[in-house]
Image: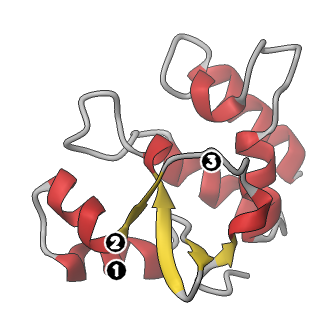
Amino acid sequence: MSSNYASHEVLPADEPLLSIPEIAERLNVVVTKVMDMVSEHKLITVQRDGIRYIPEAFLSTKKENTNRFIPGVIALLSDGGFTDEEILKFLFTEDDTLPGRPIDALHGHLAREVMRRAQAMAF
């Protein structure tokens, strides 16, 4: 179950984060649309100093849309009982078998492998 935000400490200290207004600007949508995506659990926010942020890596490489696999991975793991912190830890932790981090693999040819692994972990 989502708490509406996760602790920023679950992410690497140097992980680029964008505020909700910054995400809205990048996606060319109103802030309430981003808030809807968060409340629908299509995106996960992290809180730092009382401000909610979204990892920049959730955006597609074209930057005007979210990565199309992110909501699916979040849904798979969330339905499997994973907390937002556990989902972020999975996505942002190096995995030598990919190689690299699942979040980075979602932007390339290994995206389906990450989805497969998330599905297997959820069940």
Closer to the eye: label 2 or 1:
2
68 lies left or right of 91: left
The answer to the question of whether label 3 and label 2 lie on touching residues, with beta carbons closer than 8 A, is no
The answer to the question of whether label 2 and label 1 lie on touching residues, with beta carbons closer than 8 A, is yes
- Could you say where residue 37 lies in the image, as x and y percent from the top left? 37, 71
The residue that disc 1 covers is 35
Q: Secondary structure at mark 2?
A: helix
- Could you say where residue 98 lies in the image, as x and y percent from the top left? 78, 15
Amino acid marked by disc 2: Ile
36 lies left or right of 8: left
Disc nearer the start of the sequence (3/2): 2
| Residue closest to the eye, 77 or 64 | 64
The N terminus lies in quadrant = bottom right
The residue that disc 2 covers is 20
Res 48 → quadrant: bottom right
Disc nearer the start of the sequence (2/1): 2
**Residue that appears at 80% across and 45% down:** 90
| Residue closest to the eye, 49 or 32 | 49
Disc nearer the start of the sequence (3/1): 1
52 lies left or right of 68: right
- Could you say where residue 99 lies in the image, as x and y percent from the top left? 78, 12
